[in-house]
Amino acid sequence: MENDFWTTLLAKLKGCKATTAQRSGLQYDYLQVHDEYREGSALLRIWTLAADPELNGLLKFALNERTFPHTLILLTLSMAAPWTWMDQLQYWMKVLDNHIGGLEIDAELNHQCMAQLMAKWQSYSDLGSDPLRNSPCKRNYEPVPLPLEGAVLTSNLGMEVIVVVTRSDQMATLRRELNYREDHFDFMQQAIRRACLQYGASLVYTSVKNNVNCDLLLQYLKHRIYGLPFGTSASVVEKDAVFIPAGWDSVQKISILYESLYSCKPDDDYNSVIGQPSREKYMLDRSIQTVDEQACFARLQQELQEDAETDEPLPRTSIGTGTPQRTSEAADEDMQAVEKKSGGVGGVLTDFFNTLMLRRSFGGGDRPVEDE
């Protein structure tokens, strides 16, 4: 599922530059996956559906009865707009649930996919923090499946789900522009982690700008789809680099974040705590309009001429401390001489802008301008 920044992240995963070309409603890409251990390679096909409800009908070309048991869902959210997280997650999960329910999937196959997803969660082991993971005894050891908590996989789609929060670097902007505090980010994290428990989903915070978890996401995708080795542990210490693999999290681990929620409670309505700001107060993608250099000079020249025609004295203001101010009669006489020669204070600035415009017209600001 696509948001505005998935294209950039996908280009990062592919090792190429993002393109600004117009994307279709359902975009096809691929990743070349190499298995160094088995000396083989595979083609990982990626279908990207634009975030437009009118295009949801295209989902049937990517997810159907044939591709269902081999599909992983990657849902992207953006730290640039955290107030949309819960609405987007609930919306797309509902779209997927309705779409899968309309497919003519064999009942036995559907049951196997759901059971396999549950077994992966139950048998999860943190290999990255296990010092005995390479020992012969450990390789022959199969973990005993533990019973699931009541909050885990309550909505089992039978498919792997990874929730990716893009642009984690925008946390600094949220702090600066909207006065977000640490308890805001902790509230957001506990809310999205609880939602991921419901779908048995993994959670990854990424940033292409700061190169956060991009390579990790690629390696984790290979691990979940092809079973390739992956030894990275879960990480929740760095708030902009959260990584929670499926099977690691629990209600008890999430409750650690509750201690830092000073201005809200875990069960508070998400949109009430993380509300959408007004457009005037916060515009993430600010657009800057540029003005032609000569047009700018011409406008300033016209304004200066209009000010000079009014014959109103310009106010004199001293700024700062510790600098001697020219308040003597000599300074006043010097100023009057300059004004008389150039037709007033406005004339001095007008001559300045005229010079800049003439130099520009002769093809360079560094060339001397000959007197006419």
Image: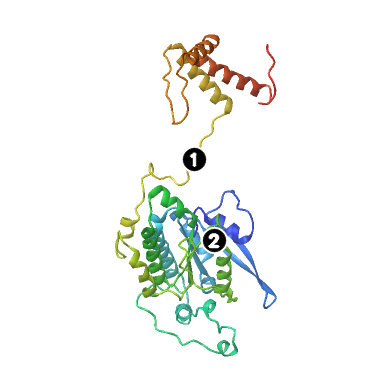
Which amino acid, by three-letter code, is at mark 2? Answer: Val
- Residue that label 1 marks: 287
- Which residue is pictured at 44% across the width and 66% down the height? 96
- Residue that label 2 marks: 212
Q: Which quadrant of the view contains residue 363?
A: top right
Q: Which quadrant of the view contains residue 70?
A: bottom right
- Which residue is pictured at 56% across the width and 58% down the height? 9
Name the spot of residue 225 as percent of width and height, x first.
56, 73
Name the spot of residue 244 as percent of width and height, x first.
47, 70
Number of residues whose C-alpha sits closer than 10 Å to that of mark 2, classed few (under 14), some (14–19) or many (20 or more)? many
- Which residue is pictured at 53% across the width and 89% down the height? 141
Helix, strand or loop for disc 2: loop
51 or 131, which lies in front? 131
Which amino acid, by three-letter code, is at mark 1? Answer: Ser
* Left or right of 171 in this view: 221: right
Using the image, determine if residue 85 lies above or below residue 179: below
